[in-house]
Amino acid sequence: MKFTLSWLKEHLDTDASLTQICDTLTAIGLELEGLEDPSEKFSAFKVAYVEKADKHPDADRLKVCLVDTGKEKLQVVCGAPNARQGMKGVFAPAGSFVPGTGVELRKGVIRGQESNGMLVSEREMGLSDEHDGIIDVTDKDPAIGTPFAALYGLDDPVIEIGLTPNRPDCAGVRGIARDLAAAGLGALKPLNETPVKGNGKAPINVTIADDAREVCPLFIGRMITGVKNGPSPEWLQQRLKAIGLRPISALVDITNYFCIGMSRPLHVFDADKLQGDVHVRFSKKGEKLAALNENEYELEDGMTAVCDDSGVVGIAGVIGGAPTGCSDDTVNVYLECAYFDPARTAKTGRALSIISDARYRFERGIDPAFTTQAAELATQMILDLCGGEAGDIVTAGDVPSWQREIPFDPAYTEQLTGLKIADTEQTKILETLGFKMNGKNATPPSWRGDVEGRADLVEEVARIYGYDKIEPISMRANKTVTTSGETQAVSVSRKARAALAARGLQEAITWSFMEESRAKAFGSNDNKTLKLLNPISSELSQMRPSILPNLIEAAGRNHDKGVPNCAFFEVGPAFQSGKPDGYDIVAAGIRHGHQGTRHWSSEDAHRTVDAYDSKADALAALAACGAPADNLQATRDAPDHYHPGRSGALRLGPNVLAYFGEIHPAILADMGIKGTMSGFEIYLGNIPAQKNKGTAKKLLKVSNLQPVQRDFAFVVDHDVDADALVRAAKGTDKNLITAVDIFDIYIGEHVGAGKKSIAINVTLQPTDKTLTDEELNAFATKIVDNVVNKTGGQLRN
């Protein structure tokens, strides 16, 4: 929201400095986002006197001028046809930046004649599109050296605030002035409430369809005849230009003045272009409107439309139509001042992709009680600037109900904020903001639709009283070091990121949605509740059921750009349904290409990634998150988007902690990915919380006794998992056996058909005494017996 200091003072009677005003705005919740002093931008430009304007000796269309700047006399070569001796213009010296052209002037020579700066046109100064001649201010007779900004009223500071959606009243300068007055920075100036006397009933009537009264409860129209439209006064044009609006004509500029100044959108029709009466109704599918922004829009069923007997002439609260708009030839104008439903206005604006100042205010909720008074004020301004004669006001509908009472308890303010404010002072603050106090109840004013409960009243009192008056209080802690504020979910996410990054994977952040057909290939979720109604593209139409597709596509893009080896991971949500808890926080990753770099000494130089790489990634992340990685069971039931023979799941009892494996070749082919790719998905929410809440690591206990290693080879059926054999061996004695590693798997004629040989290395770590040969042999026998009993295998000879 932008406005000028002079515009603010039109509503606020104050002697406060600009600094005080800006500081107070932020203090009361209207945060200052920018402050621009345009006089600084135009500081180099001054009024100058042209003493001579002789014809250029070598160019018929150029003149050599002698310009008196007040400090010095300089020669300037000028091509403007209106340059003449004795005139006063605006001079731009060498070294100045011309805003309309974006050029920095330099001293130069033009056709053999020295030129020091230039005499500028209105277009070169950004005043208008006029470029037929230089600016001529002779009639104003300003003193030589007068700053250009002061001459054209461009020395008015422009203030910009960051406006939150719940403060539509401050989408107008008057609402901001009202808040500043309540904060003690002056007094709010009263508005002229004298109604304009009409000369009789207008020939154009207004009706609202019965089914549209909920979305347009009030519509006021007024005919003003005999107006003379044209450029608006200079003060009004300057005010609009300062905040980035382009002056169009007096009638249109008046509507913009009320929209920005009082958060009260208006519209003006050329009454002679309207056919019959004005009707407010719902649109019908296929109806079209050629809008004022030079675009044509096709309407859907149920949009609020302003119509005449010929059809739609405006989209209510959003934009008007060009065929009935005002022009310089307008003689009779029909003023519209209405209240439109915020939700319906927002829905229509989004559906048609129209952004306008009117929509911005209507969809946030304007002051419903200010409709009639705004129509009277706008009528008077039209009469003052354009002349004419006003007819009687025509009203359809009534002001929507806005009154509501909220219980007010001054003690509640201290309870919520800690501020001790006298009851009388709290009441005074609310009254200066427009609240009506009735005993223990407060009635918010019509322009404060955002105030709904007791806490809102406390907020109003606290922000005006001053948040800076809340005294800082030190909190006493029972411990020198406070307990971590991390939740289990945040903790495991952080640890997973750190572990995966340490393994060389790069973190990626991808979209939370994907193409619907892609979602089906990765365990499609509930596409009825998770399909986007308004996707940014057709390729991003559904919430993702898995993070893997996005990472696979990222690897493919990298491969296409000459980066063949990729390792990415992402921690984020994967969605399964539209319920509040219908998602999982997942740490997913992929590896693509070769595991090692190309080098003669690297054993992994030509080894492509496989399922075991992803399994190692998943186990490392799980261990870092506190999961018992050594006790996890590996099973074969991975989802269908993994390779059926080169994938698995890591389980802790019935809970799946992770899936890993190579991505299915058919999916890679469909996505245009060449080569092998492995991936993993870790379900962080399934990791059990650590019982030890402390942050210290367990004490490392190192035995002073020599560890012992023994090798065993077992022949088992081909469908026996190697993990089952390892778990059986380790289960013989979990205290004495510290590691079981597979070092060989053999399938061939020496073990028989349907069989395989699995060789393991078992590490025994005694803690209290050295094991004798007899004890070692007895323990080896136990290992063999346990493996045979649990796997059905036999010790290989």
Image (cartoon, grey):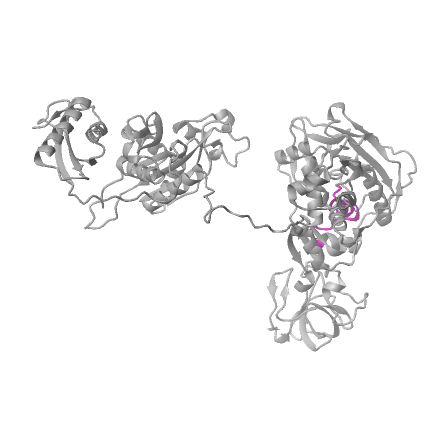
Front residue of 259/116: it is: 259
Residue shown at 85% from the left, 38% from the top? 223
Residue shown at 76% from the left, 54% from the top? 185
Magenta run includes residue 252? yes
In this picture, residue 772 sits left or right of residue 233 = left
Residue shown at 61% from the left, 68% from the top? 105
713 over 73 or under it: above or below: above
Residue 475 in view of the camera: yes
Front residue of 353/134: it is: 353
| Residue 158: quarter of image | bottom right
| Residue 396: quarter of image | top right
Name the dominant secondary structure of the magenta segment. Answer: helix
Residue shown at 65% from the left, 41% from the top? 416
Q: Whole-percent x and y of residue 448? A: 73, 39
Front residue of 726/524: it is: 726
Front residue of 661/179: it is: 179
Q: Whole-percent x and y of residue 681? A: 36, 34
Magenta run includes residue 191? no
Q: Whole-percent x and y of residue 30? A: 67, 48
478 over 117 or under it: above or below: above
What is the quadrant of the C terminus in the image? top left
| Residue 461: quarter of image | top right
Q: Whole-percent x and y of residue 386? A: 84, 48
Q: Which residues are magenta?
A: 241-264
Residue 130 in view of the camera: no
